[in-house]
Image (cartoon, rainbow, N blue to C red):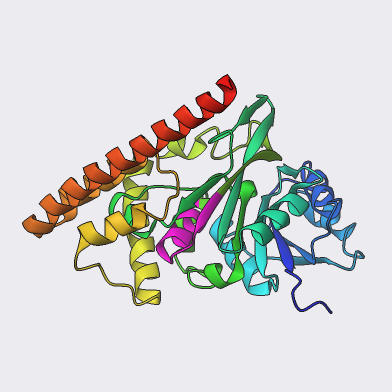
Amino acid sequence: MDKNKITTSCLINNYNYAEFLPEAINSALNQTVKFDEIIIVDDASTDNSAEVIAKFTQIANVKFIFKEKNQGQLSSFNEGFLAAKGDIVFFLDADDIYEDQYLETALNFYKRRSECDFLFCAYKKFGAIEETFQTDKVDLDLGYSVIRTLYTGEWIGSITSTLSIRREIIRKFLPIPNIEDWRVRADDCLVWGASLVGAKKFYMSKPLVMYRIHPNNQYHNKKFLDIDHNYEYKRFWKRNSLFNYIMQKNTFSLPLLLAFTSINELKTIPCPKYDDFISYLKIIFLFEHNYFWKAKGIIFLFSYFLKILLIKKLKLADKFHIISN
């Protein structure tokens, strides 16, 4: 066995998506580079999902978990992760599809950028809506986001099926006991959790995941908002509870000099954008209690911003000069 080989697990979470499930499973099976294991977690479906899954049980690398009670998406993530053995865990909703080269491309990315802990990619919507969703047209090193997430709740990631995370990062926050809080939108736990435990995040611009839009999409159709008009307010408190749990689990304490830590975190982003500077400016201005460090932090932040702008202008000038010649 190659000791340097990166092993992979694909976790497919399913609830009453029997009509879509075969496509999802086959998309994981038909990768140009094979997953070491594919784990299907069925959340006590009431349709014929069990019959669909039974057709794949003879395949060596396919495993399955049939839950006796419906407990929601986070519970499926918990149980799937506890059963998984891969170095990198890939997540797939049962109504979505991987492009054939997704795993190969993602693995090459992880090998090329060994510091990558958390990767998400662009995706294509299909079904009721057809369009490509890209955060950016180029790959991005998004750096670390502990402070940014902790103080402003910034959500740096994407939908479930575009996410992959190193096992050593996931084990720092999963399993999470608050399963009733996250019956839907449990990808929040993955995105926020990875940030809080210090994952270095990257974005891959190639759209290699197909996100199905259909009448039963919980997130896309915001059905939970129709049922509960106070959903976002309640979600704020669920987020706080989640953050407290992860912080306690990792014995994490607040930084003494927030401005200093914020600026150092900003510097982990190789090519920060205007929005990045604004985020950290807000954090320093609102949450740094030491007035000396608040002032010093704001001044340093503006100086760094001007420096980055100057570097960008010089690069553009060099590029224009090369094209002109």
**Taking 148 as reference, is 88 left or right?**
right
Specify the segment rendered in magenta. Answer: 188-202
- Residue 188 position (above or below residue 254): above
Q: Nearer the viewer, residue 19 or 248?
A: 248
Quadrant including the C terminus: top right
**Taking 255 as reference, is 110 left or right?**
right
Q: Nearer the viewer, residue 282 or 12?
A: 282
Q: Quadrant of residue 323?
A: top right
Identify the residue at horizontal 78%, vertical 66% (top origin). Answer: 37
Percent of width and height locating residue 298: 18, 47
Percent of width and height locating residue 188: 48, 52
Q: Nearer the viewer, residue 166 or 3?
A: 3
Q: Quadrant of residue 117?
A: bottom right
Q: Please check the rendered image and state whether residue 244 is part of the magenta-colored stretch, yes or no.
A: no
Identify the residue at horizontal 31%, vertical 42% (top origin). Answer: 307
**Taking 295 as reference, is 18 left or right?**
right
Identify the residue at horizontal 79%, vertical 41% (top origin). Answer: 19
**Magenta part mainly helix, strand or loop?**
helix
Percent of width and height locating residue 131: 65, 25
Q: Nearer the viewer, residue 263 or 225?
A: 263
Quadrant including the N terminus: bottom right
Q: Please check the rendered image and state whether residue 190 is part of the magenta-colored stretch, yes or no.
A: yes
- Residue 112 position (above or below residue 37): above
Q: Quadrant of residue 113?
A: bottom right
